[in-house]
């Protein structure tokens, strides 16, 4: 689902009044927006590594291929670019997402940097107007300079970013190597999986509403729970398991965990009331609800 954002400009972010839930809804949308940006709106050499170099590739894509047509596709491109640009800037300067009175998201760098809010939408507008592919890099450069100046007074200081659930990396000690490989493989294969469903790939937008057509797809192909369980090694089912878990991660503040013992998994499931997804052995990967938390970059 492509959300409509408010702005006074004439483009795909349509005018609207900010509401209390707008910011939370935007943050929940960010992971799916970024994933679709990579798969459908950017060239093959674009890499989701949040680097300054990736921002130049994104800016080139915006200048050369983005047009404010008012369609779902163009809005999705714009909002994906806003999401990625904001996350890349926070990767440098920490901070969190904020929301303007005009009705669109902004980046609030770590308060200790003393920097003004950064508006991804206005940066994108400036990039189109200038066409020199330097706008995003200049914004990142100002943050890098501010971080360097702060570290001159305290070399151990690091900007702190409020985590974006479903997007920010795990701490290494939290993520089991097998689970990391499994999740990375599912993420890499998502575009192929979406195309293989036979539906419009853009329908798989990680919203709770998209679980209904997913259930219909699985029922249509496998018919019974027994047949579905027997097909856990098939790419369609592996992708579906991951997709359901990712919806929980994005919309229920869930986190993927790995359990290698059935007894422990049963106790944990009863105690925490999690959403379960069980891929192939050696363990069961599950997405469990947990409160979002801030962490350093």
Image (spheres, grey):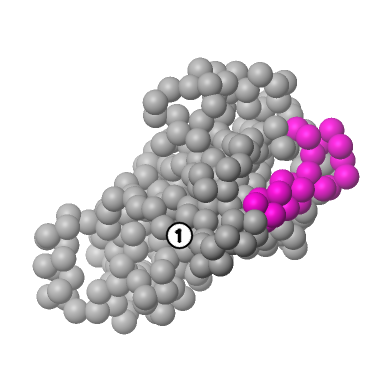
Question: In terms of image quadrants, where is residue 33?
Answer: top right
Label count reads 1
Dominant secondary-structure state across the stretch colored magenta: helix
133 relative to 221, above or below: above
Residue bearing the label numbered 1: 296
Callout 1: few (<14), some (14-19), or many (20+) C-alpha neighbours within 10 Å? few
Q: Which residue lies furthest to the front in this view?
A: 153
For numbered disc 1, what is the local secondary structure? Answer: strand
**Is residue 101 at all visible to an observer of this figure?**
yes
59 vs 253, left or right, is: right
Q: Position of residue 112 (x, y in %)?
A: 52, 48
**Is residue 59 at all visible to an observer of this figure?**
no
Q: Tell me the magenta residue range.
A: 125-146
Question: In terms of image quadrants, where is residue 180?
Answer: bottom left
Say which residue appears at 61% left-offset and 37% top-offset: 116
106 vs 217, left or right, is: right
Q: Where is residue 290 in the image (x, y as percent from the top left)?
A: 27, 54
Say which residue appears at 60% left-offset and 18% top-offset: 15
């Amino acid at each position: 689902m492509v959300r409509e954002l408010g702005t006074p400009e004439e483009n795909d972010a349509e005018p609207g009044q900010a509401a209390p839930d707008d910011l939370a809804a935007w943050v929940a949308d960010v992971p799916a927006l970024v994933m679709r940006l990579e798969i459908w709106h950017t060239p093959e050499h674009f890499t989701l590594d949040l680097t300054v170099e990736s921002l130049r590739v994104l800016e080139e894509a915006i200048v050369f291929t983005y047009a404010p047509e008012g369609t779902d596709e163009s809005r999705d491109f714009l909002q994906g670019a806003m999401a990625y640009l904001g996350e890349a800037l926070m990767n440098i300067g920490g901070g969190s997402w904020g929301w303007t009175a005009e009705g669109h998201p902004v980046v609030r760098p770590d308060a200790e940097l003393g920097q003004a809010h950064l508006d991804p939408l206005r940066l994108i507008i400036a990039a189109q107007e200038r066409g020199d592919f330097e706008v995003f890099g200049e914004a990142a450069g100002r943050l890098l300079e501010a971080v360097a100046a702060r570290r001159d007074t305290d070399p151990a200081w690091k900007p702190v970013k409020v985590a974006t659930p479903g997007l920010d990396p795990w701490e290494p000690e939290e993520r089991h190597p097998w689970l990391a490989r499994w999740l990375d493989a599912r993420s890499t294969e998502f575009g192929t999986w979406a195309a293989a469903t036979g539906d419009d790939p853009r329908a798989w937008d990680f919203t709770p509403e998209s679980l209904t057509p997913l259930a219909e797809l699985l029922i249509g192909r496998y018919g019974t729970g027994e047949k579905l369980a027997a097909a856990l090694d098939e790419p369609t089912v592996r992708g579906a398991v991951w997709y359901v878990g990712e919806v929980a991660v994005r919309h229920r503040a869930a986190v993927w965990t790995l359990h290698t013992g059935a007894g422990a998994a049963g106790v944990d499931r009863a105690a925490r009331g999690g959403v379960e997804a069980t891929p192939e052995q050696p363990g069961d990967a599950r997405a469990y609800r947990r409160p979002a938390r801030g962490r350093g970059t």
